[in-house]
Amino acid sequence: MSLLYSGPSLAVLHDEYAARGRLDPRAQLISSSHLVVDATADRVWEVMADLRAWPSWASHIRITELGEVRPGASFRWRLNGVPLRSRFAVVEPARELTWTGTFLGRYRAVDRHVLEPLQGGGTRITVEESLAGPLLPLFYREPMLRANHERWLSDLARAVA
C-alpha cells in the first residue's frame, strides 16, 4: 500500500469501477459490512433511495444539493460535517445504489449499497467502499470507515422497520 496512491482519475473510477460494480482494489482503505433486516428489498430501497429524507433518520448526514437519483446525476452532502461531492453510477431499484465521491479535492471513493432479498421477506444489505488519496492512512483508517458503515446500516435498519 502506497501512502501517496490517489487512485485512477475520477472519470475512470466512475465508469470502469463503480458503474461496473467494482471497488478500487489498490485503495488504501477498503471496507465491507452487511446487515440482515426484516424488510423487503423494495422497502429498503424506498428508504435508501430517498436521499432527501436521509437526515431524518441518519443524524450524521446532511444533503446539500440533489437532483434526480439516476446514473450520472450529481449530489452534494455532508457526512459527519465533511463536505462530499458525489455522482450516481448504478441506480437499480431494489438491487443496488452506487456512487463515486470526492472530498477535499484529493480523496476518491466508490460506495456500493447492494440489496439481496432473502427467503422469508428479509433483505441482506451490504455496504462496501474503497477510499484512496495521498497520505489518507495517516488520518483515516479502516476501523473508522467500518464504523461509519455500521452506523449507516443500523440507522437504515431502524428507518425501514
Image (cartoon, grey):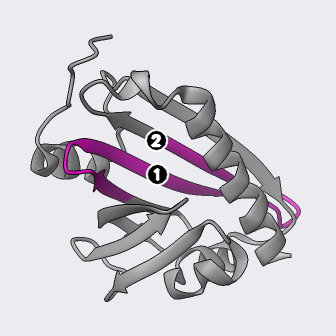
Q: Is residue 104 magenta?
A: yes
**SS at badge 1:** strand
- Circle number at residue 27: none
What residue is drawn where x is 75% and y is 65%? Answer: 155
Q: Amino acid at mark 2?
A: Glu
Per the image, label 2 sits on a secondary structure element best described as strand
Front disc: 2 or 1? 2
Residue 66 in the image, given as x and y percentages of width and height: 35, 85
Give x and y (percent) for residue 45. 60, 75
Q: Residue at x 30, y 64 (%)?
A: 86
**Image coords of residue 94 (percent x, y):** 57, 71
> Does the magenta stretch mainly form a helix, a strand or a loop?
strand
Q: Which residues are magenta?
A: 99-128
**Is 93 or 46 nearer to us in this picture?**
46
**Picture quadrant of residue 108:** top left
Task: Name the quarter where the N terminus is drawn.
Answer: top left
Q: Which mark is residue 112?
A: 1
Say if 57 sits above or below 109 in the image: below
Tell whether 22 sits left or right of 56: left
Q: Nearer the viewer, residue 155 or 37?
A: 155
Q: Residue type at mark 1: give it.
A: Arg
Which residue is denoted by mark 2 in the rendering?
Answer: 129
Let me know if residue 2 is in the magenta part.
no
Within 10 Å of disc 1 (Cα), the crowding (few <14, some 14-19, many 20+) is many
Residue drawn at x 67%, y 41% as measured from the top left: 147
Depth check: give the residue in front, 23 or 81: 81
User: Is 76 placed above or below 84 here?
Assistant: below
Question: Decide: marks 2, 1 in contact (CB < 8 A)?
Answer: yes
Kindly tell me whether residue 125 is visible in this rendering: yes
Mark 2 vs mark 1, CA separation in Å: 6 Å
